[in-house]
Amino acid sequence: MRRLSEHAYVATEFQGCNNGCVATPEGVVVIDPPMRPTSAVAWRREVETLGQVRYVVNT
């Protein structure tokens, strides 16, 4: 996961989509999580180091 700004992050290593998240004081907003379940679980663990996942947005 690569930091884009103070609160925005992106991951481009997963096949099929670009994953992102925004860390807010209320928690993390996940945007387009990985499509494969094993990848999604691994990425969620990394995202949760930023805070609790509060919302998931699928585009």
Image (cartoon, helix red, strand yellow):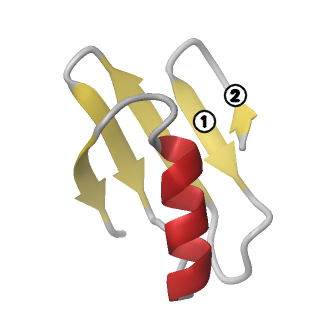
**Image height of 30 relative to 8, above or below:** below
Query: Residue at 73% of width from left, 81% of height from top?
Result: 15
Q: Give the residue at x 45% y 65%.
A: 32
| Amino acid carrying mark 2 in the image | Arg
Q: What secondary structure is found at the residue carrying circle 2?
A: strand
Residue sitting nearer the eye, 23 or 39: 39
Check disc 2 and report the residue beneath it. 3
> Could you tell which of marks 1 and 2 lies nearer the N-terminus?
2
Q: Which mark is residue 9?
A: 1
Where's residue 27, x and y in %? 27, 29
30 on left or right of 8: left
Q: Are marks 1 and 2 in contact (CB under 8 Å)?
A: yes
Q: Secondary structure at mark 1?
A: strand
Compared with residue 32, is residue 52 higher up or lower down, i.e. above or below? above
For the residues labelled 1 and 2, the Cα–Cα distance comes to: 4 Å
On the image, the x and y values in percent for residue 22 come to 43, 33
Q: Residue at point 30% right, 37% down? A: 52
Q: Can you say whether 16 is above or below 30 in the image?
A: below
Identity of the residue drawn at 68% across and 27% down: 4
